[in-house]
Each structure stands twice: as C-alpha cells, then as structure tokens.
Image (spheres, rainbow, N blue to C red):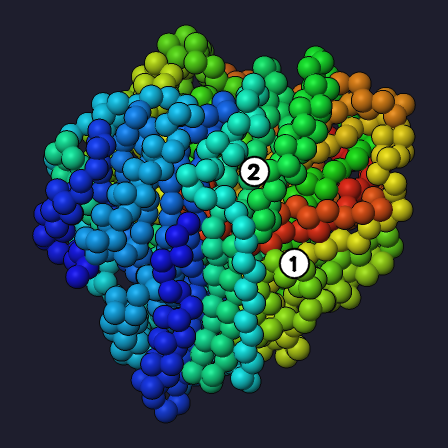
Amino acid sequence: MSRSVGWESTFNQIAEVLNQYVERGEQVLLHLVAEESQFTRFNRGRVRQTGQVSDGQLELTLIGSGRVCDRILPFTGDKETDWPLIAAALVEARQELPQLPEDPFLVTPRGAATSREEYPGQILEAAAVPEAILAPLTGTDSAGLYAGGRCIRGYADSLGQLHWFETETFTLDYSLFTADGQAVKEVLAGNYWDAAQYERQIETCRQFLGLMGRSPKAVPRGQYRTYLAPAAVADLLSMFSWGGISEAALRRSGGALRALQQNERQLSPKFHLRENFGRGLVPRFNQWGEVAPTELPLIASGELVNTLISSRTAQEYGLVSNYAVTAEHLRAPEVSPGTLNEADILKQLDTGLYVSNLHYLNWSDQPKGRVTGMTRYACFWVEQGEIVAPIQNLRFDESLYRCFGDCLVDLTQSVVCVPEVGSYEHRALGGAWVPGVLVDEFTYTL
Amino acid sequence: MSIGFGSDKTLASLARVLEGIDLPADWIGIRGVRESITRRMMRDGHPEDNMRSLDQGAMVEVLAHGQFGYAATNRLTPEALRAAAVAAYQQAVAASALRLHSFSVEARPPVVGQYYSPQQQPLDGLSPAELCELLSKICRELKVSEQIMQTNATAIANQTESWFVSSNGSEVYQQLALLETHFSATAQSGSVVQTRTNNGYLAHSYQGGWELFPQAALWEQIDRVAHQALELLTAEECPTETSTLVLAPDQMMLQIHESVGHPLELDRILGDERNYAGGSFVKPTDFGQLAYGSPLMNITFDPTVAGEFASYAYDDTGAPATRQHLIRQGRLERGLGSLESQARLGVEGVACARASSWNRPAIDRMANINLEPGETSLADLIGSIERGVFMETNRSWSIDDQRYKFQFGCEYGHLIENGELTRPVRNPNYRATTPDFWHSLVQVGDRNTWEMYGTPYCGKGEPNQVIRVGHAAPVCAFENVEVFGGAQ
C-alpha cells in the first residue's frame, strides 16, 4: 500500500485546532480508526476478488452539563477535507446536547497521559500478493483471504491526552480442501512476510490433508474425551467476551460467569486467564484515553479474581475501573499453559476426538454457561493414541464450567497466538494466546 | 474540490470523473455511498448512546483481462477517484494471470433508474428530546415489577443513498430510509434470569419513516413483553422430547435465513465462502431437481415488498431486481446468485450482488427471503395438534458450515396440549437437520399469521461484511422435532 495519507499529522493538527473551539464546561474526545488495506480473496487456488481500501472514521464525543453525545465522521487524513466536517459536527453536537437527558454514569476523561506505539512492517507489495500467496498452493483446492496494510488507532482529548497506535501487519487466513470437502485451516500473521515460513506451513497442511483422505467416520452423539486444539480453545474463549466476564453483564444478570463469581460453580485450578498487553498487538488505551494495566489477572487457579470493568460500569456500581473498553470484552487474552507435552497429545487423548477448530458458537443457556456450536476442519476420531479417520462434523452443547472446570484434564505446555482475522467495518487487531486443552466427557448432541 | 455527495448533481459529477479516466480497461464503474445514521439507546431510562454518524466513500471497480479489481476511498475528489481507478486497474492486471474466472462486461449490464423507500414521516421528524423521552417512557412502562432488573429501548434511523455510474452507461440512484427499533425487559428471581424482547434484537427493521414507530399497538406490546419476562421466571423448563414444533414468524425469520437463505447462496456452492462462513449441502445439480421440503414450502426472493427491510430496485452491480421463486411447492428452482455467480455456475440466480458499503466488493447476498402464506388459520393450526411446543423469538442460533445440522433457541414457549396453548415454558430449544426439518413442515398459516421482520446483522464474506436482510413468514408447524430446555 502506498503511504499517501498523513493520518497522524492531520489527526494531531485537528486535535490541536479543535481544542481552541472547546467552550467552558465542555470536553471533547476524538477517537480514530483508520486503515490502508490490501484484500485478496481466493478460491480453488485462484483469485476471486482483489482490491484496496483506504478508510478512516473519527468519533467525536462532546461532554457538557452532565450530558454526552457522539458524532462519527469520515476521516481522510486531509485536513482541508476533514476539518469542515468536524467543525460542523461540533456545532451540531453542541446544539443537540441540551436536548438530551443527563447521564448519571457519564465518564469524563482525566489526566494527561500520552503514548505512541508504531510497529512498522515489511509485507507484500500489492502487485506481488497473488503470486506470493497462490504459487505455493499450486495443485491444492484452497480458499481464503490475504489482508495486509496499515492499521491505526488514535485518541486525543481537550485535556491534552494523546495516544497513537500504528501497525503494519498482514493476516493470511486460508483452508486447503480434500475432494470430498474435508479441510485443514491455517492462519499466518505478523509484521513481516516470510515466504519460507509460509511454505513450511503449507507443507504441514498438505501432510495433515493426507490424513483426511480416509473415509469420514460418523460418530454417534454422546460424551467423548476430546482434545481441543488452540484455535478451538480461542473460539470457546471468545464466549467470555460475549456476556461472560463483563462486570456490567454480571451485574445486570445473565452473565455466564455469574455462578463462578458467586462461588456456586468452580473452574479447574489448572485454568488461568489474564489480559496481557505486553505483546504489543493491540493498543492499551480505550475510548476515554485510559491506559489499561499491562497485565490483569482475571481467572487464577479457577477463581474469578477480576472482571472487566469499564469506567462507566465503575461509575454506575461504585467500583474501581480497570480501564476496560465500553463493551468490556477481552482485548489481549492469554490462557496459561499446563503440563501436557505436545508430543503426547494423542497418547493422552487415548480414545476420543481431536478437534482442531470449532464454528458458529452461541449460548444455549447463557446463565448456566452452556454453549453450542459445531466442529469444523481437521477433526479426527482417535483410538488408542492413533488417528483413525476424520469425522463428520458434530454439534456440541456443553458448559464452560465443565469444559474449563470439572472435565478439564490438562492444558498443553506451550501457548500459541490465534490471530484476530476479522474485518467487519475494519481490520481487527490482536489475537488470543492459548494452549490446547484436553477435556473429558465433552458433550456432542447431533 | 470534493464530489458533492447528496446533491442532485452527484451522478453527473461521477460520470464526469469516469470520462476523465484514461485506462485500457474493458469496463469501469464507480459506486458512491453516503450513509447517515442516528442511534439512540436508553437503559433503565438513562441514556446509553446518542450517536449520529456519517459515512461516505466510493468504490471504483475496473474490469481488465477478464478480472475485476477494486479500490475504495473516502477521499471524494476527482483526483482521488482517478487514482483509485488506476489502483483498481493494477489490481486486476496483477491478478489476471491467476484469475478464478474470466468475466465479461455482461456481468455489469447497463441500467438507468432510481429507487426510493416508501416514507411518510422523515427520519429526522422527531427531535432528540422527543425521541429520548419516548425511549425513556418505554423503559418506564417495561418496569412492571421489581423483578424486572433491566429495561432497554433503542431506535436507529438510517438514510442511505447510493450512486452508480459505469463506462457502459449505467446511472442508478437509490435512496433507502431505514428504521430499526427494539425494546426488552430482563427479569430475575434468584438464579433464574430471563429476557423477553419485541420479536428479537432489532427484528423490527423496516424501510420507512417515523410512521413505523410508535404505532398504536406499541404500548400493548410493551406490556406483553414485560409480563412475559416475569412469566418466564416461574415457567417450567421446556420438556425434552420429540414433538410437534410450531414456530411464530419471528423465529421463522431466523429459520428461513439460516437453513434456506444461506445454503442457496451460489458463492457458497462455488466455494468462495468455504474458508469463512462455509459451503452448502446443496449441489449445483440440485437446482430444478431437489425436493428441499414438503409441498407446503414456497420461498421467494422478493426485493419488491414495500417496506420490507432489504427492498431495492437494482443490486450493487446494476442488475434489475425482481420477485423470483427459489422454492416452489417444496422443489428447489433457483439459487441466490449474482450475475457473476450465474456465469460461473451456469444456473439461474437473482439480482443479489450487494456490498455492505462503499468499502467492500459486492457478493451474493440475501435480500428479502420470504415464506409465502398457506391457508390454515392459527386456530385451526393449533387446534389440530395433540401435543407440541409453540416457540417465539430467536435468542440463540448455530448451524454447521454446510447449513445442515442446526440448533436454535427461543425466548418464549408454550405447550400445546389437546389442541390448545396451555402452560408457558422457558429456555425452549430445538435441533434438527435442514432437509429433515423442511420435509416435516405439515402446516402453514394463512395471510393473517404472516408477519414481516428484518435484521441489519447478516455477516458474511472475506473481507467481512454485515448487511441488511428482510424475512416474512406465517406461523408454521413441523412434525417430529427434537425439543429441549436449559441446562441442569
């Protein structure tokens, strides 16, 4: 991607100019999300769609008289274009504010923190993407998406807080298929394109794919000892972000970890979860410019030691904020490793299911922490420590309290990063650091 | 100088930009989109969100050497759009040697036309103060008991305009007025927590203005939602049994969406979606052949329904949109596929190439997918069932990547005993496989039971896109379905 847009300098200039327009008793916050991205989608090992997107959205928040309203505007990085829209939005917001009810849980920014993080990369030039991605896949039936380029998050407010996070990254999310639709899925991500690493990964996929040439085994519904590979664990962990570990969700009923919080249910003493921003994949600041602690333990030895508390939730319930974002979802989750040697996974599984990925999770009974979803991609029936055959996809319906609690046997000795590859509205950042997990009596229903 | 999106000269301005692009391309198109949204949310009568947004930008698409390339930018100057055209052309050329299919300009037919949503009262017809007071009042009315722990009310007004010009003469303008509303009550008694909504989160999503909300029945609906949330606290768990399942139209919406709409998308059948949303159990040879469900099943793709959420006159590639039967009397007739997918697969499709906004390429998408009504009254339908469960309002959904095995949960249920709705049940869930389920369709309600809903949150595509869909259906009955309740 060309570096044609002066996102940072324009953002800083606008923040500075805007502060001159702020009136007594007002506070103004700016939050920027921007990207310059290359997207190349492929199917059957050939290019399906390819293009570039340059996009920026600026959220302007006006606070005054105990009230707050937001305006979201295009941000092009060109001050001459952006400033008139922003100035008009400020005027409009100022006119609207008195019409709104007072907000008893209003969060006003404090302090004068500043930060700047930039992670330059060395990724593929746009014209090189098709050949670099597809040549190593020659002879395979493959589908996926390469997404790469600059991603930006910025924050500024009328108190003088200023944060900038910029990273140049790529994600390559792809699957290789057998003739009858069995698949291996992989993700490659980072700041540097490493062709050799990609080729090694594909070679491993090809070997895995060979195992799936055998006829799929139809496994009847029931409870089976199951190894959940890291990608599957990351999917289950994502449910913690969907009404799981949010303090607001727990306070307002229905939060899945409420029984854990109230000591009605336990998780395994082997299960530890924390937020760890130390890896630098995502910004630590939130939409109020607050900077989260580098590490925040959430579940330690199976006990809930912290929930995610935004300043708004803290304001409402008289708590201390740990600077979560408004939605109180995990931003930099990390599950601690266990003692299961990766080389012994099949041996320790003995007889049961090796599940590489899960798909389409949803609560089937949220207050009880019960989740349903499907197995997907490279899932195998294992007997006496040997892979026997790929399986036909199975529906599971199981509680987090059993999976990470009563039924958790062990976690692998190492953790891996399962990168975020989502691109709704804009490319997502970060990922989950998780081990594989061995579970007894995982419940499959269809 | 920027292109003035929103003026009556926008199409002409984009056409002039197009004329100024000098590239050896077979076809060039520019699609501009401007979306203005006002979102107001109240929780327990307190403001949660008062937001107005403007998003605008343009996608330039170029066909060269049989390959489309695109470049999207929110810089709306002629220079930026011309630069985007060059970038799009370079994309097409770079990929052409590895293209999946050699497209021709027939995938972008020339078309001239306009479309406007029906609208009586403009979307800015209520002041911020009036709307906040209305939402606050809804919260207050929902609080019918101390056991109601949380109330929510939301209204989202959206005006989207799009302009499409192309080198082969297309000039299309479409203006959508969209209103999405929602309210809910969450009740708690000890460890039992139950939420009831007005037909699901933002299920009341339609094209139109403020005439859609509030309506006369609003306050009755609020009272019903609040009391049903309380009712669920003491309701028994949904039984675990194989039973006759009756689904209300607000759950049929999800059932149709997941187990008919998505499996019929031609890009899934072609494999484009396999790495993300998945493929389909439907094979190319099934069109014209497959008995998808019982003879009572009639499904249409219908972007012409006035007020339905995903109505339009032209898709995002310029294909004119018309009503088409996808499934007639249970037999599969055609798929949900754009001109591109039709060219690739060689089967009939519909005008369904849609993009979530200016910054995403068009892909195969549902619009309004409706189940046509039958002839059975609700009283006769229920009266004929000796034992069953009537379920309303989706709250949980999951289906496999071939759209085959699914499990859905609902907010609210009733037992059907000896031809009558009797006791309410909580945590009603059901699971089945798609073909078996649709073949078990034994009764379809008449026009009086037919209701229309929509959702702004259908996710698909790489890069990801969330898009609006509409679904309308009557009450339906299915035999021998596995139903069950919550966790022990």
At horizontal 45% and vertical 75% (from top left) the residue drawn is A156
Q: Nearer the viewer, residue B396 or B87?
A: B87
Q: Is B174 rendered above or below residue B182?
A: above
Secondary element under disc 1, as helix, strand or loop, is loop
At horizontal 80% and vertical 33% (from top left) the residue drawn is A226
Q: Is residue B53 left or right of residue A44?
A: left
Q: Residues within 10 Å of mark 2 (few under 14, many from 20)?
A: many
Give the number of the mark in front: 1 or 2: 2
Q: Is B119 rendered above or below residue A262?
A: above
Q: Nearer the viewer, residue A99 or A85?
A: A85
| Displayed quadrant of residue B422 | top right
Q: Residues within 10 Å of mark 1 (few under 14, many from 20)?
A: many
At horizontal 32% and vertical 47% (from top left) the residue drawn is B72
Q: Which residue is mark 1?
A: A332
Residue type beneath disc 2: Asp
Secondary element under disc 2, as helix, strand or loop, is strand
At horizontal 59% and vertical 26% (from top left) the residue drawn is A176
Q: Earlier in the sequence, mark 1 or mark 2?
A: 2
Answer whether labels 1 and 2 touch (C-beta < 8 Å): no
| Displayed quadrant of residue B468 | top left
| Displayed quadrant of residue A386 | top right
Q: Position of residue A239 (x, y in %)?
A: 64, 49
Question: If the image is split into quadrants, where does the C terminus of chain B sit?
Answer: top right
Question: Is label 1 on the same chain as label 2?
Answer: yes
**Chain for mark 1?**
A
Q: Which residue is mark 2?
A: A173
Q: Is residue B322 visible?
A: no
Q: Nearer the viewer, residue B221 or A62?
A: A62
